[in-house]
Amino acid sequence: MKSLVICCLLLTSFAALGQSMAQPKPKEKFHMKMTPMLYVDAIEPTLPFWRDRLGFQATVTVPDGDKLGFAILMHGDIELMLQTRHSMGNDMPFMEKYSNPGANLYIEGDDFNDLLKRVDGFEAMAPVRTTFYGMKEIVIKEPGGNIVVFAAKAQ
């Protein structure tokens, strides 16, 4: 009887050990950060749009010959990376076939009229619209060729 109890205790212990090893404990907090990266032919023509019109600051710039090949821009907590297709091709040749726009940015502000002033003169892909989900939007093609939707809550 004593050996049966010991055997059961051992089996229970091994089963518990197996369960604790098989299932990792979930982390209490899972933090992520997403930074969009836009591929462009040249960074210099895009900087006035992001810096002068929208208030981003270049925190990192990396030359590629006599031009910029990469830049990190910040606006508060928002981070945006720009990389030339040439620089990306040198860095990761397998990515060249993915460097054409396949996504767009959706940037929400708190004042739509201010957003309109900031993007005035840039190519609008569609007229201003009010969506069924209560946002006023305009779709702009930024100088690097990427599509950016600017939005604010409709008033």
Image (cartoon, rainbow, N blue to C red):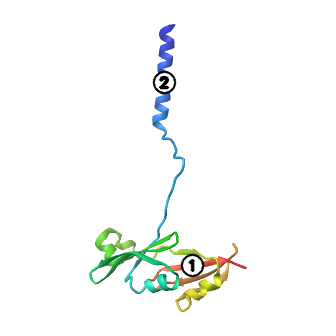
In this view, the residue in front, 131 or 64, is 64
Q: Where is residue 154 in the image (x, y as percent from the top left)?
A: 70, 78
Check disc 1 and give the amino acid type.
Val
Q: Decide: is 22 above or below 92.
A: above
Which numbered dot is residue 55? none
User: In the image, 69: left or right of 129?
Assistant: left
- Quarter of the image where one finds residue 67: bottom left
Q: Position of residue 139 (x, y in %)?
A: 57, 82
Q: Which residue lies furthest to the right in this view?
A: 155
Would you name the residue on which mark 2 appears? 13
Q: Residue at x 56, y 90 (%)?
A: 120
Foreground: 19 or 153? 153
Rendered location of residue 143, percent (x, y)? 45, 86
Q: What element carries label 2?
A: helix
Kind of element beneath mark 1: strand
The type of residue carrying mark 2 is Ser
Q: How crowded is mark 2: few (under 14 residues within 10 Å), some or many (20 or more)?
A: few
Residue 36 position, x and y percent, is 47, 70
Q: In this view, does 35 lie above or below 144?
A: above
Mark 2 and mark 1: span between their CA atoms?
Answer: 57 Å
Of mark 2 and mark 1, the one earlier in the sequence is 2
Count residues near mark 1 (Cα–Cα under 10 Å), then give few for <14, some for 14-19, many for 20+. Answer: some
Question: In the rendered image, which quarter is residue 21 located in?
Answer: top left
Instruction: Answer left or right for 79 relative to 68.
Output: right
